[in-house]
């Protein structure tokens, strides 16, 4: 039973790491977008073009960050579902051994 608990904890820890990595990457993407915006603002483009380009970059960065986070959440959910299935099978085997079911 300790092995099951340990496996579940390991998978949960891995899922948390994936989500944290996605959040970190999202922050990096937004920082890169901010740096790009600063470059554009310091250039000598007409203000309207600069604002339009800034909005485009920020929207693209947010979309990319949201996609990464959603992908990580999906992967974490899949991992959790897999663990739950494995735990259920292990529990069935334990109950079977304890009750003697399946022995002939």
Image (cartoon, grey):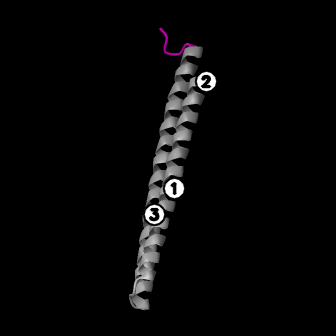
According to the picture, the residue beneath numbered tag 3 turns out to be: 29
Vertical side of 91 occupied by 58: above or below = below
Circle 3 SS class: helix
User: Going by the image, does 40 lie left or right of 81?
Assistant: left
Residue at image x 47%, y 68%?
62
Q: Where residue 29 appears, x then y in whole percent? A: 45, 63
Q: Residue at x 54, y 51 (%)?
A: 20
Q: Which residue is mark 1?
A: 24
The residue labelled by disc 2 is 2
In depth, the one of 12 and 101 nearer the eye is 12
The picture places residue 99, in percent across and down from the top left corner, at 59, 15
Marks 2/1: CA–CA distance? 32 Å
Q: Under tag 1, what secondary structure?
A: helix
Q: Residue at x 47, y 57 (%)?
A: 25
Label 2 with label 1: CB-CB less than 8 Å: no
Quadrant position of the N terminus in the picture: top right
Q: Residues within 10 Å of mark 1 (few under 14, many from 20)?
A: some
Q: Earlier in the sequence, mark 2 or mark 1?
A: 2
Residue toward you, 63 or 92: 63
Label whose residue precedes the other's in the sequence (3 or 1)? 1
Examine the residues drawn in magenta and state their main secondary structure. loop
Among the two numbered marks 3 and 2 on one chain, the one whose residue lies closer to the N terminus: 2
Look at the image and give the residue range highlighted in magenta: 100-104
Q: Position of residue 37 (x, y in %)?
A: 45, 76
């Amino acid at each position: 039973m300790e092995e099951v608990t340990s496996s579940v904890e390991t998978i949960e820890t891995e899922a948390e790491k994936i989500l944290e990595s996605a959040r970190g990457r999202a922050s990096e993407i937004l920082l890169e977008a901010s740096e790009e915006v600063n470059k554009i603002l310091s250039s000598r483009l007409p203000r309207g073009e600069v604002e339009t380009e800034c909005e485009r970059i920020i929207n693209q960065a947010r979309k990319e960050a949201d996609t990464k986070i959603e992908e990580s959440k999906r992967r974490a959910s899949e991992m959790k579902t897999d663990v739950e299935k494995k735990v259920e099978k292990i529990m069935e085997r334990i109950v079977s051994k304890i009750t003697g079911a399946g022995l002939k």
